[in-house]
Image (tube, rainbow, N blue to C red):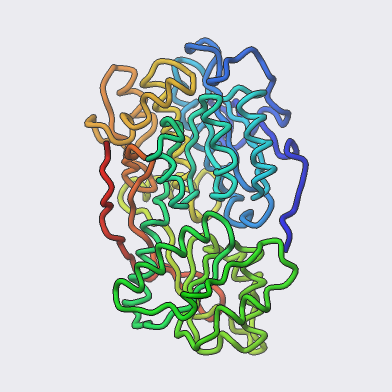
């Protein structure tokens, strides 16, 4: 299915409530251009911290992305209710990136150059972040993605491309690919096919997954002919046939929800997936994806028995956040909501630690508040209170410890999920990738 396109400004809103109803927006018009510097709002606390959010309300990842702006707003309203940042309320401008690099680039340009934000939460799709992060770096805007997991960003950070203006709260696919490979071998699959979306996310994941499987005694049935599908293709029958050729016991699919559902249906309708287990990733961890794939004639989900991985989170911080989320939104927590909340909180904590509301100020303190030697704290308001007293902190997020390294990466554990016969999703296990080997310097 082709990516849907809409005007970039259609989804803009500004959140500027202080002590008001947590989920009420004070305005639904784009933020004024103002006189802010390229690094964000005017220097110092007088103008208040302005943030941006670049997230997918429409397009191939909208089924997962729909709760992300709500998580951003929850974080901002929580902080504003306990005094804001540097003595002023925080505002946020939200843009729909449409899961499209072109639209995302345009929206990022607006956020950085017209809205003059100091930091951006986003994007989710690695392809969109790849197009947006150069704009952030150019304008000295701190960018924290809650879900762009391509290994390409680690390499670029190591090369100095980002100058410290990039980080993410979800671990890179360098680790998730190894975790999915470990899961496949744990389940006894020795011959595995692959099919991936042809972008940074899919190809980067594929490379590490293939290496991990073959290095640990497994075989990739289409290793010499990798199957990479065009997300704008009208049909995916050929790609489905190629992925399931050579009789694999399982097929690892690195997909997005809209186009991925077309691929899964194509395999099912050709009778290729009968008796073969789908191995999936976080990109399709949603009830909406399962619904799009559909059910067989007997009412059973076509994806029944599929296995997948998704960045997990555990501990008291997640429990507290989950309770708050349900109370304030009335919704069940979904994938990457904790990662989005943590990304937003980190931007605000870094600005408070720096005593300035610019992108450069946030960049200078982001690792210190995320992974420094200070007091471990998971409550955003408590963390702000400590910073106001001049005390160092080590923020422990709802998504994990969010210890950001020199490349902007975090390492996490992964939940193992499956699809039940009725189409519901269930977390059934955890899997941890090998420890990182790169030096943090």
Question: In the rendered view, does 386 fall on the left or right side of 360?
Answer: left
Q: Position of residue 319 (x, y in %)?
A: 37, 50
> Between residues 156 and 179, which one lies in front from this camera angle?
156
Q: Residue at x 47, y 52 (%)?
A: 150
> Between residues 300 and 432, which one lies in front from this camera angle?
432
Q: Position of residue 246 (x, y in %)?
A: 50, 87
Please tell me in which quadrant of the rendered image residue 133 appears. Answer: top right
Q: Position of residue 338 (x, y in %)?
A: 45, 47
Q: Residue at x 32, y 22 (%)?
A: 387
Vertical placement of residue 69 versus 258, above or below: above
The reply to whether residue 306 is visible in this rendering is no
Question: In the rendered view, does 179 fall on the left or right side of 372?
Answer: right
Quadrant of the snapshot with the N terminus: bottom right
Question: In the rendered view, does 305 fall on the left or right side of 213?
Answer: right
Q: Residue at x 38, y 56 (%)?
A: 174
The reply to whether residue 274 is visible in this rendering is yes
Quadrant of the snapshot with the C terminus: top left
Q: Residue at x 56, y 71 (%)?
A: 227
Vertical placement of residue 261 versus 317, above or below: below
> Between residues 383 and 347, which one lies in front from this camera angle?
347
Please tell me in which quadrant of the rendered image residue 310 appears. Answer: bottom left
Image label count: 0
Q: Position of residue 219 (x, y in %)?
A: 38, 79
């Amino acid at each position: 299915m082709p990516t849907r396109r809409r005007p970039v400004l259609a989804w803009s809103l500004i959140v500027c409530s202080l002590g008001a109803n947590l989920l009420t927006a004070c305005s639904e018009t784009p933020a004024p251009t103002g006189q802010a510097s390229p690094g964000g709002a005017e220097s110092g606390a007088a103008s208040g911290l302005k943030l941006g959010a670049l997230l997918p309300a429409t397009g191939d990842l909208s089924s997962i992305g729909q709760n992300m702006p709500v998580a951003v707003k929850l974080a901002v309203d929580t902080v504003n209710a306990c005094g804001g940042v540097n003595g002023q309320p925080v505002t946020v401008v939200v843009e729909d990136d449409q899961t499209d690099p072109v639209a995302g680039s345009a929206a990022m340009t607006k956020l950085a150059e017209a809205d003059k934000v100091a930091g951006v939460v986003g994007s989710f799709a690695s392809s969109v972040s790849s197009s947006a992060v150069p704009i952030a770096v150019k304008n000295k805007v701190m960018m924290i993605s809650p879900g762009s997991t391509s290994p390409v960003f680690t390499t670029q950070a190591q090369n100095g491309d980002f100058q410290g203006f990039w980080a993410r709260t979800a671990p890179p696919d360098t680790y998730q690919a190894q975790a999915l490979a470990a899961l496949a071998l744990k389940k006894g699959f020795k011959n595995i096919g692959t099919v991936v979306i042809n972008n940074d996310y899919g190809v980067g994941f594929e490379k590490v997954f293939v290496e991990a499987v073959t290095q640990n005694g497994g075989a990739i049935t289409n290793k010499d002919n990798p199957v990479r599908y065009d997300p704008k293709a009208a049909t995916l029958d050929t790609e489905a046939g190629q992925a399931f050729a050579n009789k694999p016991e399982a097929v690892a699919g690195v997909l997005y929800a809209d186009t991925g559902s077309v691929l899964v249906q194509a395999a099912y309708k050709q009778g290729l997936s009968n008796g073969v287990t789908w191995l999936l990733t976080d990109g399709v961890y949603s009830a909406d994806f399962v619904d799009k794939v559909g059910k067989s004639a007997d009412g059973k989900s076509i994806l029944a028995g599929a296995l997948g991985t998704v960045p997990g989170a555990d501990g008291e911080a997640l429990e507290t956040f989950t309770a708050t989320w349900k109370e304030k939104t009335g919704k069940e927590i979904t994938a990457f909501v904790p990662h989005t909340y943590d990304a937003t909180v980190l931007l605000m904590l870094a600005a408070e630690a720096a005593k300035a509301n610019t992108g450069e100020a946030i960049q200078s303190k982001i690792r210190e508040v995320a992974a420094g030697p200070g007091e471990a704290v998971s409550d955003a308001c408590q963390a702000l209170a400590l910073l106001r007293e001049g005390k160092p902190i080590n923020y422990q997020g709802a998504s994990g410890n969010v210890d950001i390294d020199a490349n902007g990466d975090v390492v996490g554990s992964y939940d193992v999920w499956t699809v039940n016969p009725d189409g519901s999703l269930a977390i059934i296990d955890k899997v941890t990738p090998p420890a990182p080997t790169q030096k943090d310097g």
